[in-house]
Each structure stands twice: as C-alpha cells, then as structure tokens.
Image (cartoon, rainbow, N blue to C red):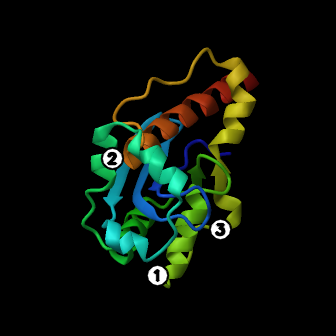
Amino acid sequence: MNLLETDVMIDVETLGVTANAVVLSIGAVAFRTSTKEILSEFEVIIDVESALEFGDVDASTLKWWMKQERVARDLVMSGETETEDAVYLFKDWYLSNTPSRVWGLGPSFDITLMERLFHFCDKEILWRPWQIRDVRTVIDIVSPLMSRPSKFEGTEHSAIDDARHQAIFTMDMLTLICERMK
C-alpha cells in the first residue's frame, strides 16, 4: 500500500441497517497517510422526503435515532438537497480528489449504500472492487498494539465528523503498522 497516495473515507447516516436503507447524509474526507493530513472534506444532508424515495426505513433504527443527541438528530433531518443532486455533488468532489482507495467502516455498509445510490441515479460506480478498504479489519489487526483510539471531535453520528474521525484513526493505525514493520 502506497501511503503517499490519496484515500477517501466515506460515512453515511441512514434510517436502517441493511443495504436498502434510506440515506440521510453523506460525509467523506480525502486524506493522505504519509503526511497524516485531511486534504478535503465533503458533506451533504439529503432532504428527508427525497431520501425516502430511495430506500426503506427500519423502525428500530428510527427508535435508535430518537435516543441520540438532539444536535445529531436535528442535523440529519435538516437536509434540503435532493438525493440525485447529492450523488452528483459527491461524484464531482470524489473525482476532484483522484483517490487510490475508498474506505468505509465495515465491508458492506457505507460503500454498498453509496453504490446503490449511484445505481438509482444512473451513475457509474466511481471505484473498482479492488480499491475498497475496510476500517474494521484494520482495527481488529491493530487494536492490540494501540493504547487507545484517537479522541472523537465533533458530533457523533454526523456523517462528516464520523468520516473525519475514521480517517484520522485509520491514518494512526496504518502509521503504526508501518513503524512496526521497520
């Protein structure tokens, strides 16, 4: 893995836990592990009525949202962007960063939901299968070597804040792996 290349971390906030869940917001950060820097950020909050046209709502997830901090609930419900527009905006941002890899927290959720949105909006998937990376796998491998994860900054369950945190933690883990291999 070339740590000089640009990676993108994606996080979505949803109204479900399946591959057919309603997507309410998309957060992403472009980052470079070699310099441990966030290069750019993307966030879009989708209009709830528009989002409901592209997925299913899970009652248990809706109940879960009601137990979250008010600021997170208000944020995820404040969207004014149509789903199709959100996908187009994400595509433009993603392509402007020319990433080598795309990361998600889990191999079959955030990335899978984004791919489903691309299909709904008649857009080509922006990455190839071999470019997809999973943060949880790296966590499982590296966590015994780390004292504790990076401190979370921002609002939990804000897609952009979650993506930023995951990117920082991933950079920390990959740096540790490289140092241990020396």
Chain-order first, disc 3 or disc 2: 2
Which of 89/80 is in front? 80
Alpha-carbon span between mark 3 and mark 1: 18 Å
SS state under label 2? helix
Pick whichever of labels 1 and 2 is earlier in the sequence.
Answer: 2
Residue lying farthest to the top in this orientation:
147
Q: Are marks 1 and 2 in contact (CB under 8 Å)?
A: no
Q: Nearer the viewer, residue 76 or 70?
A: 70
- The residue to which callout 2 is attached is 73
User: Between tags 1 and 2, which lies in front?
Assistant: 2
Q: Give coordinates of residue 92: x percent, y percent.
A: 38, 69
Question: Which label was assigned to residue 121?
Answer: 1
The amino acid type of the residue labelled 3 equals Arg
Q: Is residue 30 above or below residue 80?
A: above
With respect to residue 162, does 101 lie above or below? below
Q: Amino acid at mark 2?
A: Arg
Residue bearing mark 3? 128
On the question of residue 78 being in view, the answer is yes
**Mark 3 or mark 2, whichever is nearer to me:** 2
In the rendered structure, the answer to whether residue 42 lies left or right of residue 118 reads left
Q: Quadrant of residue 1?
A: top right
Amino acid type, callout 1: Cys
Residue 28: where, in percent of width, then height?
43, 52
Q: Between tags 3 and 1, which lies in front?
A: 1
Graded by Cα atoms within 10 Å as few (under 14), some (14 to 19) or many (20 or more), the crowding at tag 1 reads some
